[in-house]
Image: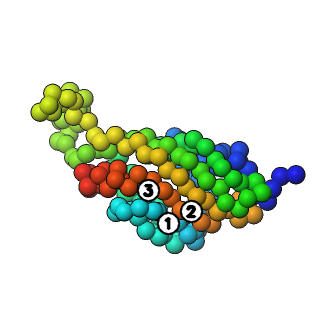
């Protein structure tokens, strides 16, 4: 008999669209007044008391400094089914814009060379997350504690905003 909360497989499916940078289906499974805490010591850390504030102050802020939408892929899910809580391990991959370049240079960005002879590219934003999620019996997320690489987030924002 299945448990009252989403199974590991169902949770993986709920998160699946994020691997392509599509968050719409995922957020359909998050209640509007979610209690979302981003852990750490960086500009995005803090408690968000609703979905809209979390999206605006974290994902949209990060999205604005990325070359393409942040892609987050599920690596592992622990819990779910009979358990109200589940931990979702996510791997994010993206590249930061690292500042504005004149439009002529953007086209030839891959050909730009730095003082050390290396190619100039944006900061690689490969981050690992652990989202500790609490679910209701309707299959919606009601609480999240998100753990991540604080130093990388801080660096990305400082170099790109």
Q: Are there few (<14), some (14-19), or many (20+) residues within 10 Å of tag 2?
A: many
**Residue name at image x 24 percent, y 51 percent:** 159
Task: Determine the CA span between mark 3 and mark 2.
Answer: 14 Å
For label 3, the crowd category at 10 Å Cα-Cα, with few meaning under 14, some 14 to 19 and many 20 or more, is some
Q: Determine which residue is flagged by label 2.
A: 144
Question: Which element type, helix, strand or loop, lies under badge 2?
Answer: strand
Above or below 158: residue 94: above
User: Considering the numbered disc 3 on the image, is that residue within a helix, a strand or a loop?
Assistant: helix
- In the visual, does 112 lie left or right of 74? left
Q: Judge from the rendering whether residue 114 lies leftward or rightward of residue 65; answer left or right.
A: left
Residue 25 in percent (x, y) is at 60, 51
Asked if the residues shown at circle 1 and circle 3 are in contact, with their CB atoms under 8 angstroms apart, the answer is no
- Between 120 and 104, which is closer to the camera in this rendering? 120
Residue 90 visible somewhere in the drawing: yes
Q: Depth check: 62 or 74 in front?
A: 74
Q: Earlier in the sequence, mark 1 or mark 3?
A: 1
* Residue drawn at (56%, 62%) of the image: 144
Name which residue lies at 26% across and 51% down.
160
Q: Which mark is residue 59?
A: 3
- The mark that comes first in sequence, 2 or 1, is 1
Residue pointed to by mark 1: 37
Location of residue 112 with respect to 86 vertically, above or below: above
Q: Residue at 19% x, 42% y: name it.
A: 101
């Amino acid at each position: 008999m299945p448990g009252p909360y989403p199974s590991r497989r169902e949770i993986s499916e709920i998160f699946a669209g994020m691997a392509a940078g599509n968050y719409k289906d995922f957020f359909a499974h998050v209640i509007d007044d979610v209690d979302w805490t981003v852990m750490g010591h960086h500009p995005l850390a803090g408690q968000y008391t609703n979905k809209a504030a979390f999206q605006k102050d974290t994902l949209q802020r990060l999205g604005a400094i990325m070359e393409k939408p942040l892609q987050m892929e599920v690596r592992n899910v622990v819990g779910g089914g009979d358990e109200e809580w589940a931990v979702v391990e996510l791997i994010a991959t993206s590249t930061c814009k690292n500042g504005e370049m004149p439009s002529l240079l953007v086209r030839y960005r891959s050909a730009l060379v730095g003082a050390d002879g290396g190619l100039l590219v944006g900061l690689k934003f490969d981050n690992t997350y652990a989202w500790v999620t609490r679910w209701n019996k309707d299959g919606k997320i009601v609480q999240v504690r998100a753990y991540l690489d604080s130093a990388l987030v801080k660096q990305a924002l400082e170099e790109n905003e």
